Amino acid sequence: MYDILFIQEPPWNFIRFAPSTTASEGNEVVGAPIHPDWTQVVRFPQDSEQMPRVMCFIHSRLSRLRFALRRDIVDHRDWCQFLMNVYLDDLHTAVDFLSNAAPNIPYLLYMGGDFNVRDAKWNLSVSSHPAAGQALIDLAESYSLVRSIPALSVPTHYSDISGHANSVICCGNH
């Protein structure tokens, strides 16, 4: 059983129309799927171009722990903190952002997510060690985190493109 689910690239769609005093058809409600037993922790977008790329679902059993998104400490659409859920885009903006924000971030228990980095340090089928991989390692070390080693060496990304090999594109949970 799971109590906390980290989601990368969550679905963010039209859910329903809500009653409105200004529009006869109602106002559109847009967001991620909801369930009464799960609380969403997500940075809601300011506009339609900045959809969240990470979110967390926390089971109601943990409601007494009062999980919350701490926008007063760091406000960025690619992560939540203390238990950090990271999404690295092709420009690795989250690593850059978090490297600069490190002095303002309290102790982290966990960092996981979709790192989108192919690196020889965690993927034996890759021969390179790109700067983004080293930046991710340096970031994790700055928070005193260590990389977890999977019990089985299996791909974390299965390509649906013919001729493309499956690979390990993240370095696991830190």
Image: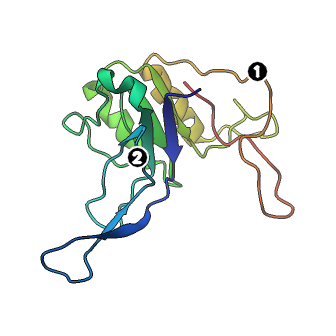
Under circle 1, the secondary element is loop
Quarter-of-image position of residue 150: top right
Q: Position of residue 33 (x, y in %)?
A: 45, 54
So how many labels did they put on this image?
A: 2
Under circle 2, the secondary element is loop
- Tell me which amino acid carries mark 2: Asp
- Tell me which amino acid carries mark 1: Ala
Quarter-of-image position of residue 170: top right
Task: Tell me if residue 123 comes above or below residue 108 in the rendering.
Answer: below
Give the color scheme: rainbow, by chain, secondary structure or one colour: rainbow
136 to the left or right of 73: right
172 to the left or right of 51: right
Residue at left offset 35%, top offset 61%: 50
Task: Tell me if residue 16 comes above or below residue 131 in the rendering.
Answer: below
Provide the residue designation for mark 1: 151
Provide the residue designation for mark 2: 78
Query: What's the distance in space between the residues labelled 2 and 1, CA to CA?
Result: 28 Å
